[in-house]
Amino acid sequence: MKILITGSCGFIGFNLSLFLLRKGYKIYGIDNINNYYDVKIKYKRLKILKKFKLFKFYKFNLEDEKKLIKIFKNKFDAVIHLAAQAGVRYSISNPKKYIQSNVLGFFNILNACRLKNVKKILYASSSSVYGDKKKFPLKETDIINPKNLYGLTKKNNEEMAEIFKNFYNLNLIGLRFFTVYGEYGRPDMFMMKYLNSKKFFDLYNYGNHYRDFTYIKDVNEIILKLLNKRNRGHLILNICSNKTIKITKIIYEINKYVNKKNLHINKINLQKADVVKTHGQNKKVKELTNFKNFTSIKSGIKFLTDWYKEDMKN
Ligand SMILES: NC(=O)c1ccc[n+]([C@@H]2O[C@H](COP(=O)([O-])OP(=O)(O)OC[C@H]3O[C@@H](n4cnc5c(N)ncnc54)[C@H](O)[C@@H]3O)[C@@H](O)[C@H]2O)c1
């Protein structure tokens, strides 16, 4: 099976590529290796993937439609679209990047899939589409109302996917990821930021945030099951553990394994683009994939910190 994974040097794209390569899939990766966060970790991930003969890599922007179409001559059995300008806070200072990568980039992917008759498309949406909500857990059928431009581009992706399904009969699955964490994680996200901080750490909303943390290896397993499942039309799924955890509890768990005694925690106000709480219902994805054993936050943090301490030595 030949699979195109966009964003293959990113956190989820790298972990998923590695997982599928180990299972014998042929993976074609695309990434522009942008500098939204330190590119060193992106090159480090790429170096690992390049060790596999079954991995082929292309470095370019998805906005470049001509290059993208050329790559589709490889006749992919499936496309997993994970490339995007991620990050909620960054969307305030850099709005245009979100339109370029997430709207135009996504259109180019869908259009290439249409022209080259790709049978299966999975794409990353986000829990950010929900916005600030009062009623939990969040269900796929709830009304969505994004609070920031990032979430709005993901809502637009879902709507564009629906139109492509209606007019061109594409088979699509939109994955609403809820705070994915784990090995080779994103340095701009809470857990890695906390692990990497030495002297000071800004704790937004005085630590009163709640997130439905989802372990990366659960995400890999779910995507594999979805790849091998026949689906018609356009599905949207929450990809979450269905457990919401207070941020201060995460700090407590990480501190069990990593010495942060000299770290000064600076408690500050809520950031305007942030939502206060996420907590998703995962009934739909469980029923569809039969994946039931989500990794507990305690185990996930243990795996993450074990990896982190080992990685620091290299
Ligand atoms: N990590 C999470 O918790 C989370 C939560 C919700 C949604 N998502 C979504 O999942 C996907 C993967 O997220 P991630 O955490 O791995 O992010 P990431 O930033 O680590 O990975 C995205 C990768 O895409 C690449 N990229 C960005 N724009 C591109 C473009 N125009 N052309 C080519 N490459 C481009 C980047 O260089 C990066 O390596 C994204 O779509 C993100 O919005 C992630």
Image: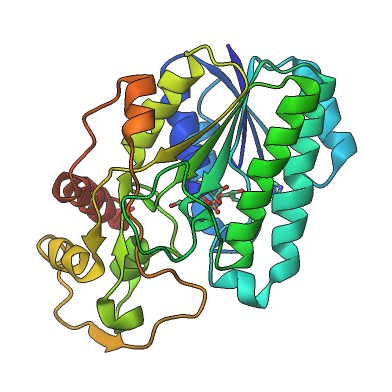
In percent of width and height, residue 39 lies at: 57, 58
Task: Give x and y (percent) for residue 125.
Answer: 55, 45
- Number of disc labels: 0
Specify whether 303 is left or right of 275: left
Is the N terminus in the top left, top right, bottom left or bottom right quadrant? top right
The residue at 34%/81% (across/down) is 205
Residue drawn at (20%, 71%) of the image:
248
Vertical side of 33 occupied by 38: above or below: below
Please tell me whether residue 149 is drawn above or below residue 240 in the rendered image. Answer: below
| Left or right: residue 92 compared with residue 280 | right
Q: Please, which colouring scheme is shown?
A: rainbow
Residue lying furthest right: 66
Q: Nearer the viewer, residue 71 or 112?
A: 112
Q: Position of residue 67 (x, y in %)?
A: 85, 35
Q: Determine the residue positioned at 70% across, 69% down.
A: 95
Measuring from the top left, give residue 99's x and y in whole percent: 75, 59
Question: In which quadrant of the rendered view does residue 89 lie?
Answer: bottom right
Determine whether, in the image, residue 112 is placed left or right of residue 297. Answer: right
- Seen in the picture, residue 120 relative to 235 is either above or below; the reply is above
